[in-house]
Amino acid sequence: MAAIRKLVIVGATGMVGGYALRYALEQPTVELVMAIGRRKVGISHSKLTEVLHSNFADCSALTEVLKGQDAAIFCLGTYTGAVTDADLRRVTVDYAVEFARVLRVGSPAAAFSFLSGIGADPTGQSRMAFARYKGEAEKALLGAGFPRVYIFRPAYIYPVEPRKEPNFSYRLLRGIYPVFRVLFLNQVIRADDLARAMVDVTVRGRGERGGMVLENRDIRAMVDA
């Protein structure tokens, strides 16, 4: 398996993407990291290149910069309830598929890792919009033609660092996290642990060519190992 020397991270200003970026920059085998997003990541590093891109509905402008990349980690997303249903689908499905399309043209041998979520339903039968849209994105990415696709389906992602929670449910979960972690260990994952797992799997590879779906239990097993 070819070494991952050029890595792209989309959504590096987000909770998981931010940890993924910092961890990737520490890896000696990764020579260059490109962060693509709407705003600057706020850090400086000799390996880091930033590309500002505002319209992920059309990634054609990224054609040149995405040539010759070895792998990409796509962490761009939004919270259910924070946007309209149409915007939720646009961010969850359309943005990921459009980015993958352009990356595939310039880097057909690249590995692709996607931050999905627990309960994602590729059949489209779920009553939950989040599950349907994440499943739709997964199905499209697995069929996009990349030699390796890693789908990460975390459960509750613990933020680690203090932040303004997006809604009451997240505030509640953060408050009861210590107890929740003891009782339901495989239903939680720390944001930094999830990010490290995503980078490690993308850079080092796991399994044969093709697609791999990693549930929260699988991700935790990697972290514990």
Image (cartoon, rainbow, N blue to C red):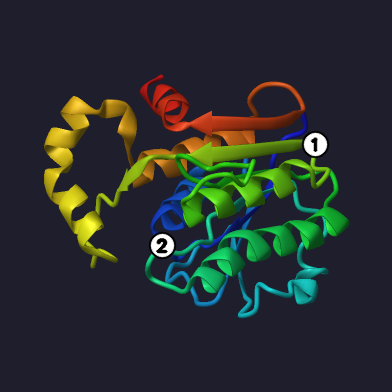
Residue 36 rendering spot, x and y as whole percentages = 61, 67
Which quadrant of the view contains residue 80?
A: bottom left
**Local crowd size for mark 2, using a 10 Å CA cut-off: few (<14), some (14–19), many (≥20):** some
- Figure check: 168 above or below 198: below
Residue at 41 percent of width and 26 percent of height:
217
Classify residue 106 as left or right of residue 176: right
Classify residue 143 as left or right of residue 165: right
**Local crowd size for mark 1, using a 10 Å CA cut-off: few (<14), some (14–19), many (≥20):** some
Residue 164 rendering spot, x and y as whole percentages = 23, 67
Amino acid type assigned to the residue bearing label 2 in the image: Thr
Residue at 60 percent of width and 68 percent of height:
90
- Figure check: 79 above or below 128: below
Q: Is residue 28 visible?
A: no
- Figure check: 124 above or below 149: below
Judging depth in this view, the residue of 17 and 34 nearest the camera is 17
Residue at 59 percent of width and 32 percent of height:
213
Q: Which mark is residue 208?
A: none
Residue at 77 percent of width and 27 percent of height:
209
Which of the marked residues, 1 or 2, is nearer the chain's N terminus? 2
Residue 207 rendering spot, x and y as whole percentages = 67, 21
- Which residue position is annotated with label 2? 80
Judging depth in this view, the residue of 39 and 142 nearest the camera is 142
Classify residue 96 as left or right of residue 103: left
In what element is the residue under mark 2?
A: loop
In what element is the residue under mark 1?
A: loop
Q: Which mark is residue 147?
A: 1
Residue 120 rendering spot, x and y as whole percentages = 53, 43
